[in-house]
Amino acid sequence: MHIETDPGAQWVQQAATDARAASRVLSRLPEAARNRWLAAAAAALRARAGDILTANAADLAEAGGNAAFRDRLTLTPARVEAMARGLEDICVLPDPLGRVLAAWTRPNGLAISRVSTAIGVIGMIYESRPNVGADAAGLCVKSGNAVILRGGSESRHSARAIHAALAAALRDTGLPEAAVQIAPGPDRFYVAAMLRAAGMIDLIIPRGGRSLIERVQGEARVPVLAHAAGLCHTYVHAAADPAMARAILANAKMRRTGVCGATETLLIDAAIALGLLPVLVADLAALGCAFRGDARACAVVPTLVPAEPADFDTEWLDAVLSVAVVDGVAGALAHIARHGSGHTDAIVTEDGDAARAFLDGVDSAVALWNASTQFCDGGEFGFGAEIGIATGRLHARGPVGLEQLTTYRYVVTGNGQTRP
């Protein structure tokens, strides 16, 4: 094998070689062995919570950014505990490996079955959320995959402290340490090397901002499972229950403004805008939200800041909400088709026909009826955790959990058949 002189490429080649061997071991282990590591890893995160929080404090001391960015970066005792519980939740999920997805017998007597199997080596490139490393490792090991992590420079201390806990659990349970590896540093040449590692890394999953996703999709020579911007919409239909609409919108926008499932645009039906839009704006303004309104919204609430042309194409990831008045379900769908990113979109209505028209018409990975867009989350879907959100059309869409980290192969059983 040709060994490149670039230090990033050298490390990735060795890491991928070791990861391939580790994946072969993992994918052949009984589920109980993989579950033992998950339980041990959860215990290690709890035991090392002090070290993890100290490392996170160092990251925060070096970080700038707005409140939403710092929220994504921040770990607390509760968030460390949530990481540990996430691994335990994965532990109790059914084994994704060895499932017979379909089976049939041909006229010649050949019995054919389609069986789930691990993908192999996953490259995980992520930015400010340090908990991503634990979630990715848990999902990968349970699904028989080895994972190579590369966290962002802003979370480098936290990422390494979390990895140390996961690696200790691998040693304690006798699993290969190469099952979960992390790049030695935050240098960008590790990212470049991972993106060039065709034949060594089977799948790259980026999780971060638009610039990271665009770079990965533009440079990768390895298949990529990614999402575009989280330009999520909440459409308040003319038949919405006003109290429900107020509660859902406040949660969808303001629960955590920096997550990709946060609503970035409110669409409100023209039939109810005059009465309800001022109330919705007042609710969110009281929570610290700012607004960018189209001409029709500003006519109803003159205090709104008029929207610039690019505002409806902006993933704010902050306490800012774009607002547009639309004419019925058709108007909402047209706006989303023009400005959406295929991530998550919701309708609030008591009209079942309108809801079905919206759900059938919106081309998004996740569509909701009478619920907050912030439910677009692997844990909330019952996946235990998620390794990311996929908005493409191949292999997976929406929250990516255990099932989406497997592929399949065919097993064919005969009794001496030969092909004529």
Image: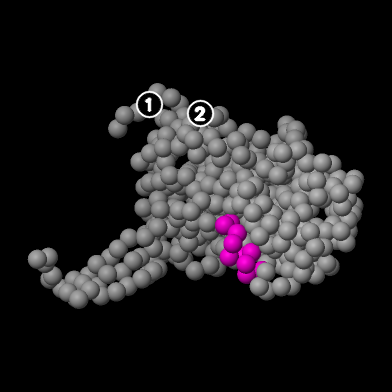
Q: Quadrant of residue 159?
A: top right
Name the one closer to the observer, 77 or 7: 7
Label 1 residue SS: loop
Left or right, 291 with respect to 15, comes to right
Kind of residue indicated by mark 2: Phe
Q: Residue at x 77, y 66 (%)?
A: 238
- Picture coordinates of residue 340 (x, y %)? 63, 49
User: Quick check: marks 2 and 1 in contact, CB under 8 Å?
Assistant: no
- Residue 209, magenta (yes or no): no
Residue 408 falls in image quadrant? bottom left
- Name the residue: 48% across, 31% down: 192
On the picture, is 353 further left or further right than 175? right
Horizontal side of residue 371 vs 31, given as left or right: right
Q: How is the image coloured?
A: one colour
Relative to residue 43, is residue 240 depicted above or below? below
Q: Amino acid at mark 1?
A: Glu
Q: Residue 172 at x, y = what percent? A: 51, 53
Residue at (76, 44) in percent of width and height: 318
From the image, tell me which residue sits under label 2.
189
The stretch of residues the image draws in magenta is 355-365
Near-viewer residue (270 or 11): 270
What is the secondary structure assignment of the residue under circle 2? Answer: helix
Q: Is residue 350 visible?
A: yes
Residue 69, percent across and down? 73, 41
Residue hosting label 1:
4
Residue 64 drawn above or below residue 74: above
Instruction: Give the Cα separation between the discs numbered 2 and 1.
Output: 13 Å
